[in-house]
Amino acid sequence: MKATILHAPGDVRYETVPDPRIEKPTDAIIQLSATCICGSDLWPYRGLNGESGPQHMGHEYCGVVVEVGAAVRTVKPGQFVVGSFCLSDNTCPHCAYGFQSSCEQVEFMTGAQAPYARVPLADGTLVATAEMPDAEMIPHMLAASDVLGTGWYAAVAAQVRKGGTAVVVGDGAVGLMGVLAAKELGAERIIAMSRHASRQALARAFGATDIVAERGAEGIARVKELTGGVGAESVLECVGMAASMEQAMGVCRPGGTIGYVGVPHGVSLDGQKLFFAQHRMLGGPAPVCRFLPDLMDRVLKGSIQPGKVFDLTLPLAQVAEGYKAMDERRAIKTLLRVD
């Protein structure tokens, strides 16, 4: 089959690779119904991860099981499944505590920008639907695999509560899903920090009540103005840059909580500043498996439509253009059709 390989920064190719196969009895092979490009895929694409050599790309996936290993018990061929980008056994002490992304056997999904993919630890990672979803449901189910689950975790980690105020730093796909999550969790006021008209419109569609376009000290001052000089009790940091973390800390009130899910690049914290800010902080790779059954149920019931975050759809063979469009900010998130 053909699959997406990153050979060097900016050099993405759709080329022939060996077909995936069962390597361990806990594996499953799925035929993807759709796949996509993640904002975190842009880090190696831009050469910012320090990695070299060809890499199989793609960690967001949903599709139909075609084969399972001898030890797999919870899914079977013919079932439609969604899985997390963090692969977990869902039985170890950390999984039982709700942090499957810190599983004692954790692996990170790769190779999903392809027609078929191998999913290790299938029993603990894949969640099956009772019936085959309609075609129009596929983008929404695909979003649950990572970007929705990550935005949801940001909101949960930030302790978004009913009637509360949340600020979302970052208007990429994860930030927009954070807005949706904050709305679903009952926040009365949701301030989205965004400078791009198309993303502002989508943020409002997902539930943002206010938009702040300013950055740095001006952005912090504007949020403080909107909150009566107090700041927000829940802040979702969805970028991972030093400036975005500074923004998050600047708009969080004393005693408030920052949920940070942006993969850190160049972020360092001043211990003295952190000490006197009196912020709670929780983040890291999202334990998507914790939320998947609930999120999939919300999608299937039609109560949320996270797939609206995909604003560019291309055939999988044109994956290189999808990367380019996202890198140049011509697209928020690219869905890749598996024809």
Image (tube, rainbow, N blue to C red):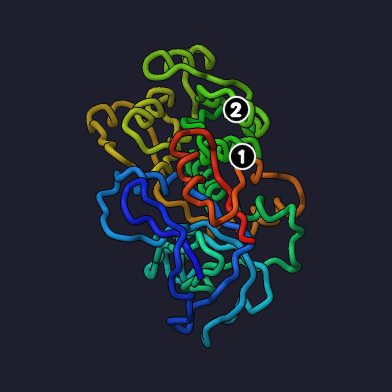
Q: How many marks?
A: 2
* Circle number at residue 311: 1
Residue 56 on image: x %, y %: 40, 62
How far, Cα to Cα, is label 1 from label 2? 10 Å
128 over 176 or under it: above or below: below
**Residue 25 appears in the figure:** yes
Which residue is at the far bottom?
70
Query: 216 or 235: nearer the eye?
Result: 216
Label 2: element kind: helix
Query: 242 or 172: nearer the eye?
Result: 172
Residue 163 appears in which quarter of the rendering?
A: top right
Residue 50 on image: x %, y %: 25, 49
> Marks 1 and 2: CB-CB under 8 Å?
yes
161 over 69 or under it: above or below: above
- Chain-order first, disc 1 or disc 2: 2
132 over 333 or under it: above or below: below
* Classed neighbour count for the residue bearing mark 2: other residues with Cα under 10 Å, few (<14), some (14–19), many (≥20): few
Task: Tell me what residue is drawn at x 48 percent, y 75 percent.
Answer: 20
- Give the residue type at disc 1: Asp
Residue 76 appears in which quarter of the rendering?
A: bottom right
Label 1: element kind: loop
* Residue pointed to by mark 2: 198
98 over 74 or under it: above or below: above
- Give the residue type at disc 2: Ser
Residue 308 on image: x %, y %: 66, 41
**Residue 234 appears in the figure:** no
